[in-house]
Amino acid sequence: EQQKIATILSTWDAAIDKCKAIIEQLKLRNKGLAQQLLTGKMRVKGFEKTKWKFVCFENIALINVNTLSNLAGNEFSFFYIDLSRVKDGVFEFPKEKIEFENSSPRARRIFKKGDVLMATVRPNLMGFGYVDFETNEMICSTGFAVIQPKENVDGKYIFYSLFTDEIHTQINALITGSNYPAINSSDVANLQIPYSNNIEERKKIIEILDTATTELNQYQQKLQTLQLQKKGLMQQLLTGKVRVSV
């Protein structure tokens, strides 16, 4: 019976390992795809002759436009997005509100749908996220730069660009030798990215990267399902609640 149980659980282990391997392959593929498309090294069909140039974020976006006033009022409460809640484009949402009077002094940054959050504290850990949800009653940490795209600029293009080698190189140069690795708002404003002059090409690039990201997300969800299934099986099989035939 012990051997049968081990065999059943090893089947889930194999499926989990296979799913993890696919996820790592997709992460590498997506990173390479973004690096090629967002630098113009790989051109979208039909836009081969479009001109590219380097632009600073301040040319295509506004940085930290709105900050919560210290006079917000003690009765004001909100969901707080701190630095630990954003990683590699994924948001972890708080379940409970906090009151202004009990909040951290860092809980002051106002953001909205369509913005990009960029962690400026330890930015090499890539606490970056694209806000594709409504932000009513949400405030984020001043440890983020809130990047608000200007007209005819898509925040997703900026978001995907944050993961390119061009940005990493600039960030690493700014934080090298620092005991407290952080950059400030002016540093963010001066970060440069390669940029297509054609809005339609930029939309196509976002479309391709969105499709690649969706595929990765599907496998990550599948991994979570397999892990939950294994946990449930272990609980049932290793306590004798579910018996196997021998």
Image (cartoon, rainbow, N blue to C red):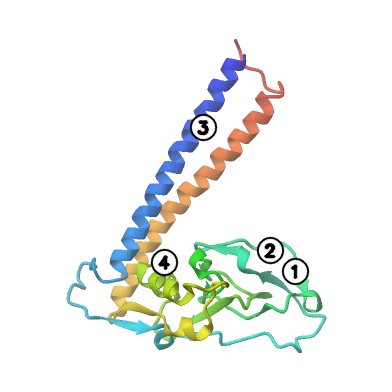
- Which of the pair 151/99 is nearer the observer? 99
- Packing grade of label 3 (10 A; few <14, some 14-19, many >=20) is some
> Along the polypeptide, which appears first: circle 2 or circle 3?
3
Q: What is the three-letter code of the residue carrying label 2?
A: Pro
For label 2, the SS is loop
Judging by the rendered image, the residue that carries numbered circle 1 is: 97
Q: Secondary structure at mark 3?
A: helix
Residue at (62, 78) in percent of width and height? 142
Residue 4 in percent (x, y) is at 57, 17
- The amino acid pointed to by label 3 is Asp
Give the alpha-carbon distance from disc 4 to disc 1, as whole Å: 31 Å
* Badge 3 vs badge 4, beta-carbon distance below 8 Å: no
Q: Which residue position is annotated with label 4?
A: 163
Amino acid type, label 1: Lys
Residue 17: x and y in percent read 47, 37
Q: Nearer the viewer, residue 224 or 20?
A: 20
Disc on res. 13: 3
CB-based contact (under 8 Å), mark 1 and mark 2: yes
Number of marks in the rendered image: 4
Q: Earlier in the sequence, mark 3 or mark 1?
A: 3
